[in-house]
Image: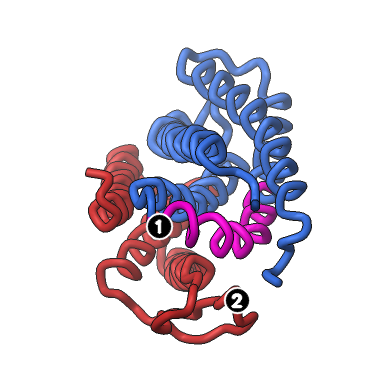
Chain colours: A blue, B red
Amino acid sequence: MVFLEDVYELGLLLHLFVTFVLVGSMTHNLIHVSRYIRGKFARQKQELLHMKIMFWSYLVTYIIGALIYPAFRVHIRATAFDPVIPWATGLFEVKEHWGTLGLAVLLSWWYIRRSINPETDRTHLFFGCLPLCLIFNVLVWYKIVVGCWLTMLKGAIS
Amino acid sequence: MRMKQADTTFVVAWVFTAATTFFYACTMWLKLKLPTYYPTEHTWGLGKKDGVIGQGWYGKGMFAIGAAAIVALIVWLILRTLAKKDLSQAGVKCIGLIAIAVTVVCTGCVLYYEFNKWGVF
């Protein structure tokens, strides 16, 4: 018996549902940051709220993913991916590694954002928050697309 | 007079991000032996074992984030004790661009390593 094997599918669904929250808050944040770039600073409170939601939803998604990983590793990757479609393992491995890098990017983004005023610290915004926001979006969208694709190939333990 | 909070935070945060991606890429390219979980045996060990399924991802993440946190802490202590002036705009741009370059290159290295290993290319 592998760790959390019995509740793997439930964990995977939760992982997906919290990702919906993450995508919503992340997209709102991208819009807020693009407004700042155009010199519009009216919705800072909402932006900070979306940042908070994004941070916690990413953390919860990450933890659920880490918890269900052993069951996936044994029952799906080792049996269905590695020997038959190794390229799928390659896509998955990058998804996992980028998950950890995304955590570092998000922590830094939050840390910088809390200490600056977008209206007055424009250089910090352009060379701190904006690139971190874009890098985070790229990492997370890769994870979402690849995660959904691999789950379509083989998502459940049989 | 100390460096202003926004500058200290900017430098420390970018050092943390760039160092995390750098250390993460190092775990792959240098093939470091890090804590690995063996899900079928319910045990932890160092590195791969022949014929046993292992999960090195947990160890890689802990190592990269832990090492980067130590580096960031050292930088924060240095800035707090030694830095007397605020960063110039050019300084902010320079640090930002170098950190973006390190982060993007190391993140790309991670992708290249896995895609090459598993025949995606």
Can residue B85 be seen from the camera position used here?
A: no
* Mark 1 lies on residue: A82
Relative to B31, A15 lies left or right: right
Circle 1: element type: loop
Is residue A81 found inside the magenta-colored segment of the image? yes
Circle 2: element type: loop
Q: Which chain does tag 2 point to?
A: B
Could you say where residue B55 lies in the image, as x and y percent from the top left? 50, 70
Is residue B28 found inside the magenta-colored segment of the image? no
Q: Is residue B10 above or below residue B70?
A: above
Please provide the residue range marked out in magenta. Answer: A61-83
Relative to B14, B90 lies left or right: left
Pick the residue in front: A10 or B61.
A10
Tag 2: residue type?
Thr
* Mark 2 lies on residue: B40
Tag 1: residue type?
Asp
Q: Which chain does tag 1 point to?
A: A
